[in-house]
Image (spheres, helix red, strand yellow):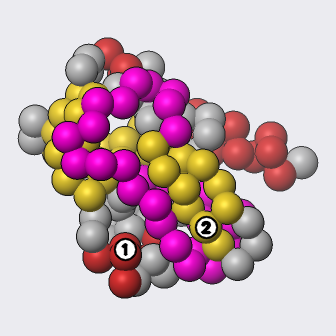
Amino acid sequence: MTFDETVRYQDSHEWARKDGDFYVIGISDFAQDSLGDVVFVEFPELGATLKKGSAFGVVESVKAASDVFMPLGGEVVEINTVLKDSPEKINQDPFGDGWILKIKATSDQDFQNLMDAEEYKNYTKDLDD
């Protein structure tokens, strides 16, 4: 299991990384491993303003479909269109090419309130027991 030290996590297994004026959002290695082979990703509309904790799309795998939730509130400024034709990128590189969207956050404080890699690692360890 990989735990990227450059991102922060929420308990529903999405991550966020600060990238200049924006935040990149995806699902964790733990989440993609739990889902299995990802076959489809549903995105929000560009320009949509979403609240922290709201569902912004669906990641569907051969096992199940799972809603994905905003770790931060903000406006969607970019979606990873590569995932439309290659959703398996989420399995192959969840913290790199498998990112899902970028947002302009309404508050940087939401990011600070997310778990760091060590906290998330401990959190997922409890889920495996």
Give yes or no for residue 54 being in the magenta stretch. yes
Marks 1 and 2, Cα distance to the nearest angstrom?
12 Å
Q: What stretch is highlighted in magenta?
A: 26-55
- Compared to residue 22, the image places residue 97 above or below, namely below
Mark 1 lies on a secondary structure that is helix
- Compared to residue 47, the image places residue 109 above or below, namely above
Q: Looking at the image, which is closer to me, 124 or 87? A: 87
In percent of the image, x 27 and y 70: which residue is there?
A: 81
In the picture, measured across the screen, residue 19 lies left or right of residue 17, that is left
Total number of numbered discs in the rendering: 2
Farthest right residue in view? 129
Q: Position of residue 127 (x, y in %)?
A: 80, 45
Q: Mark 1 points at which residue?
A: 83
Q: Looking at the image, which is closer to me, 27 or 7? A: 27
In the picture, measured across the screen, residue 11 lies left or right of residue 109, that is right
Pointer 1 and pointer 2: residues touching (CB < 8 Å)?
no
Give yes or no for residue 80 being in the magenta stretch. no
Q: Mark 2 points at which residue?
A: 60
Q: Where is residue 49 in the image (x, y as percent from the top left)?
A: 29, 30
Amino acid type shown at disc 1: Leu
In the picture, measured across the screen, residue 51 lies left or right of residue 102, that is right
- Mark 1 or mark 2: whose residue is earlier in sequence: 2
Label 2 packing within 10 angstroms: few (<14), some (14-19), many (20+): some
In percent of the image, x 37 and y 20: which residue is there?
A: 110
